[in-house]
Amino acid sequence: MDAVANENEVRLRKGTSLNERFVLAGLAILLCLVALPGLVHLENGHWLGIAALFALLFGCLLLGAALLDRNVVWIITSGEILIGEQRPFGKLHRRLVRDDEISGMHLRRSSGKSIEFSLVFKTESGNLLTSPPLPDITQVHQTTVRIARLLRLPDPEPVENPLDAVNAGIQLGKPANPKRVLGYTVLAVLLACVLSFPFIHALWNGALSALGIAVWSLGAIVVFVLFRYVHRMSGACWIIQDGGIRIERFSLKGATEVETIGGEDVETIDVESGPKDGLYVIAIRLRTGKKMRSPALAGKDQTRAVQAEIIRRLRLNPSGGG
């Protein structure tokens, strides 16, 4: 996806680069080559042959995705949309849509774990055209308004976007909620009861060994730690405001803690990998040496956009702020 080129043109892209396709195709070919020798076991019904067959099919799917996935680009200028679509080694298909062919436009938010926004245009013939995702998650409102002005259309109804720069406070994570803590507590109690049942049954029948007592004791320690830190498990909420970041979380005793970070407190702001694949966090290192990590965000581009907005709101030097 490309950012906005200038005030009189908006470019939206969707697809993978040539290098990314080469990497994906290479992995697919390697997977197929590794799986081929295992197919000799398929005739005997051995599990190794079945696993090799599934690996071969998966490799073929990856290779097909690398070869057949199309690249799409929309160039929106004053009064028209130029749409280009092309598959690798294929012919470029162009389509021009003028503003007098468009009867309406609305903003659509994706339903996946990653927050993405696309524009859906309805033509006079009744067809729907869905754009590639808007480039900057923090500039959705601004980009949408610019596109509406270029095509001489009314501004679409806004869609909730907690990461948009037009918000007075950009919110990362969920606010501290006692109900969430209660849910974690109930889950910990149920887990402790289920895992303790075999040991209680063995103790009742006089069959509890020394090893069983040790394992039960270790489990009790784990449950105690869970109860001790159950309020911390509810996470933290970052509210990024003009001039500072407000961080809300529960203390170990269940009270709401509020911490504020100003631009003068920050040494660096970086993007780091999150707790799961595809998730990223914004890591802020304070001048005191303390490091704080934000709630996880889906997608590196989205996280970098939020990082840039934090640097802007804290009035930091972009080169020095990460």
Image (cartoon, helix red, strand yellow):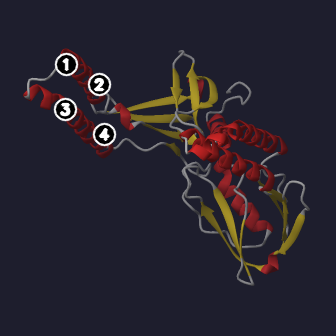
Q: Which residue shows up at 48% across the image and 36% down it?
A: 246
The residue that label 3 is drawn on is: 198
Q: Looking at this view, is 74 or 31 the one in front?
A: 31
**Label 2's element?**
helix
Q: Which residue shows up at 67% across the image and 49% down it?
A: 57
Q: Earlier in the sequence, mark 3 or mark 4?
A: 4
Residues marked 4 and 1 touching at CB (< 8 Å): no
- Alpha carbons under labels 3 and 4: distance apart: 23 Å
Q: Which residue shows up at 52% across the image and 33% down it?
A: 275
Task: Tell me the amino acid under the disc marked 2.
Answer: Val
Q: Is 77 rendered above or below residue 253?
A: below
Give the mark toward the camera: 2 or 3.
Answer: 3
Give the mark toward the camera: 4 or 1.
Answer: 1
Task: Tell me the amino acid under the disc marked 1.
Answer: Ile
Q: Can I make out residue 113 in this image?
A: yes
Q: Earlier in the sequence, mark 4 or mark 1?
A: 4
The residue that label 2 is drawn on is: 222
| Label tally | 4
**Label 4's element?**
helix
The residue that label 1 is drawn on is: 213
Q: Looking at this view, is 50 or 74 the one in front?
A: 50
**Label 1's element?**
helix
The residue that label 4 is drawn on is: 184
Residues marked 4 and 2 touching at CB (< 8 Å): no
In the image: residue 8, left or right of residue 14: right
Q: Earlier in the sequence, mark 2 or mark 3?
A: 3
Residues marked 3 and 4 touching at CB (< 8 Å): no
Dividing the image into 4 quarters, which one contains the C terminus? top right
